[in-house]
Amino acid sequence: MHPRLWFSLLLPPLMLGLALLWFQMTQPLEWLGVSPPPLEELTVERTIIDDDGLALKVRAGGSEPMRIAQVQVDGAYWRFHQEPAGELSRGQAAWLQIPYPWVEDELHEVTLVTGTGVTFGHTIEVAEPTPQPSIEQLSGYGVLGLFVGVLPVALGMCLLPALQHAGARGFQFTLALTLGLLAFLLVDTLEAGLELAAEAASLFQGPALVWLTALVAFLALLGVGRRHGLPPEGRILAWYIALGIGLHNLGEGLAIGGAFAAGAGALGTFLVIGFTLHNLTEGVAIAAPLTRLSIPAWMWVGLVALAGLPAVLGTWLGAYAFAPHWSALFLGLGAGAILQVCVEVADYLRRTAVAEAMSPVSGISVLGVTAGVGIMYATALLVQV
């Protein structure tokens, strides 16, 4: 590359950096008599409850370094130990160890007081011992992930032989049903991602993180899928659907594992059954592009694993290393992948309808999309975390 071209590329960011450095060093706002007060912000990212008391992972997000001076639990000041000690700069995280005699199944209110007197509250809705990593615990969360991820996808895929005997109208209905299922999953994934983004420290810009991650994932997958100029269909489309559902199930597993670890999954068996029923149609969505094809057994297993096993990984990460910004990031990826699949399924539905001399927007298509959304909505009523 010509040196002049390099110079033209590097000059704008270099000058911008110098301008920002000058602004920081000279503080021109002081010339106007303006002295903005330092902003303090503190976010509790994780709570661990054990025999030693309470442990909170906090992250500072203010404009200036801040110091945690006091801790209140249920209205009483309590001693605590901070690791690492000292002031917290913007973006820095620390653990607060509070030897408080918590009561199981009770609500506890924690208030963090900074050196300037600003308070930040954190509520422990239901005090439950945080699970400690062990073979038994890993196995239990693994079985939970299998139930909510792998089992329903496998059962849905078992409907493939029945779908393969459907005629042209049945095939169109199945594709439309898949589109409705995925459309609901897209909205559900975005909603869950934005909800978790609101719990993350503001410096991560959670909502923007979800939307931008979804956009990047959508464009990247769309570019890869159409790199040869042809839209994916058949087996390739099934793999893309499985990938999108797998990313969704990863985020779902993170939320489930975090909820159970925090004691919010007290509904236990009812919760697992609800998610299993809710995810049953995911296998149907994967099978839809395969209804006119025969697939080997290894591909059937691979599709089920790609769509379902991320739920197992999600429950493990959610139970032992939950962080709202990471969960929001993964759900953003899932939303982008599902959006790409929605576009491809809609295009595939249009092309197959034209090939069969049918209208892409026929009564059977509208019925299929409506049924897909309705089924997902009805089964979602069973899911309470």
Image (tube, rainbow, N blue to C red):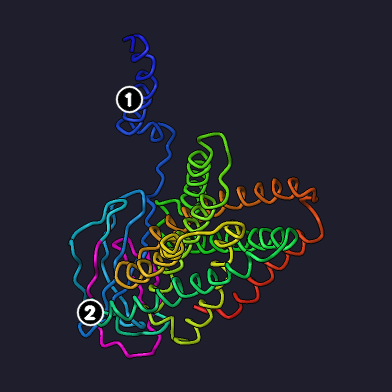
Residue flagged by tag 1: what amino acid is it? Leu
In the rendering, at what x and y percent does residue 179 appear?
65, 58
Q: Residue at x 46, y 53 (%)?
A: 333
**Which residue lies under the disc numbered 1?**
18
Question: What's the mark number on residue 126?
Answer: none
Against 314, residue 208 (above or below) is above
SS under mark 1: helix
Residue flagged by tag 2: what amino acid is it? Ile
Against 117, residue 21 (above or below) is above
* Segment tinted magenta in the rendering: 94-123
In the rendering, at what x and y percent does residue 241 appear?
53, 56
Question: What's the mark number on residue 135?
Answer: 2
Q: Is residue 155 magenta?
A: no
In the rendering, at what x and y percent does residue 98 appear?
24, 77
- Front residue of 146 and 112: 146
SS under mark 2: helix
Q: Is residue 117 magenta?
A: yes
In the rendering, at what x and y percent does residue 203 appear?
40, 51
